[in-house]
Image (spheres, grey):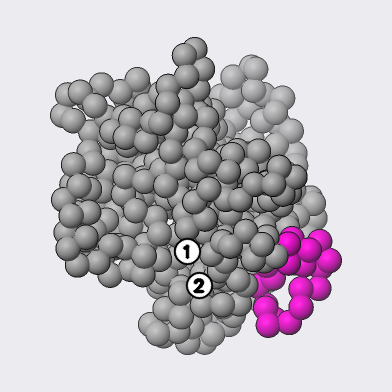
Amino acid sequence: MNTLFDKIWDRHVVQLVEDGPTQLYIDRLYCHEVTSPQAFAGMRERGLKCFRPEQIFCMPDHNTPTHDQDKPIADPVSKLQVDTLAQNCKDFGLTHFAMNTKDNGIIHVVGPEKGLTLPGMTIVCGDSHTSTHGAVGAVAFGIGTSEVEMVMASQCILQQKPKSMRINIEGSLRKGVTAKDVALFLMAKLTTSGATGFFVEYAGQVVREMSMEGRLTLCNLSIEMGARGGFVAPDETTFDYLRGREYAPKGKQWEEAVAYWRTLKSEDDAVFDRELSFNAADIEPRITYGTNPGMGVGITERIPSEESVGEGGRTSFMKSLNYMGFTPGQSLLGHPVDYVFLGACTNGRIEDFRAFASIVKGRKKSPAITAWLVPGSWAVSRQISEEGLDKILTEAGFEVRQPGCSACLAMNDDKIPAGKYCVSTSNRNFEGRQGPGSRTLLCSPLVAAAAAVTGVITDPRELL
């Protein structure tokens, strides 16, 4: 009767604390420059070394500029963060994928593409979007800085076991609908708190037919429904994706690993604390209109009316619309846009650049648009060149920047100016998330590309 979550969780239990949390063993700790300094400082104060340094992988991504990475970082705060991580890795003997090296990128993009992220693992990072790694069939979740220190010191963490939820999406996705649209649809249905306290298993025909890149996008956004994390049972798509990757098992060890990974699925009679089902036919390309990721509509739909919003939520609904400069009942189609951002740990993979290029090929960037196209890693950057996507993008008037978190969050040079609209493939549209006063509309790479060539919010199906 075990769920997949039970199987992985129970295998990693070190100790059950009576009337308290579980002591859970962690297979992999990822660190970036923003949430690790205090953890390293705490380790120094207590005179501790990392318990299993070979299980810890570090890289800067939030503060890294996306141009001129061969030059010193101009912003003093960003430079301090990046330099501090480099020094901490040296002092504690940890693997460091430094900025402007072939191994660098966004930690949630690099982990899976290097085969560091594997089925059945427990994975943590001081970053909420660690849920991304669940796409390969791992239990992956974000933790706080004090917990980062706990894992460094013991390779364990104290955690309450979340409840289990399964979300089934049946049918086949329609033309122009992507994994990002599925995630935005689920957030609108469940709200940003609808999965609080749960670990979500995604299932159904839509998920089985998704590429690994699509699954990574879907799991990345689990946290935006309030979930502790989200994951997909490993299958042939998973094994094909991981086979031959740098840190994946090789030879006989690969065969043994796959044999175990095939057992990682929920039993037919497994009981979930909550189970939901949705139909792919109900999902169209989507875009957000508000200041949380759950405030979104299908691209042809209108912003809800004030009356349709529950009385308790009307004040925040109107506050959000006022910030965005929208009105209840408004259609977003044709609304002018200033910036387009393709990238982030949500949509910075090669498949996302292929999708973007499929729309802009043979067209030109709108002169009204400032576009930032940012790969999630140097490996993605190399693939963009190898596949000739850079030529398609350049001919259309776009420039591919260097890897990093970029305009997902205002921690580096890529900030959206106050009052400007940015159609973005990132994961959050909070007030000021992309820069003080910026207005963010979340969408898929196809919707972003359609806006980039037309200068206004456009249904990408008209351009496919």
C-alpha separation, residue under disc 2 versus residue under disc 1: 7 Å
Q: Residue 29 location in percent, x, y? A: 51, 50
Q: Residue 262 location in percent, x, y? A: 18, 47
Q: Relative to the observer, which residue lies in front, 33 or 192?
A: 33
Which of the labelled discs sits on residue 110, or is there none?
A: 1
> Is disc 2 placed on a helix, strand or loop?
loop
Q: Residue 42 location in percent, x, y? A: 71, 44
Residue at position x 63%, y 27% in the image: 306
What amino acid is labelled 1 in the image?
Answer: Val
| Residue 272 visible in the picture | yes
Which quadrant of the structure image shows residue 253?
Answer: bottom left
Which quadrant of the structure image shows residue 67?
Answer: bottom right
Q: Is residue 260 left or right of residue 107?
A: left
Q: Is residue 78 left or right of residue 91?
A: right
Residue at position x 56%, y 24% in the image: 308
Specify few, some or many for label 2: CA neighbours under 10 Å numbering under 14, 14-19, or 20 or more. Answer: some
| Residue 324 visible in the picture | no
Residue under pointer 2: 103
Q: Relative to the observer, which residue lies in front, 303 or 195?
A: 195
- The boundaries of the magenta stretch are 63-84
What amino acid is labelled 2 in the image?
Answer: Asp
Residue at position x 46%, y 80% in the image: 382
> Is disc 1 placed on a helix, strand or loop?
helix
Kindly give the residue lying farthest to the top in the view shown. Answer: 19
Q: Is residue 379 left or right of residue 39?
A: left
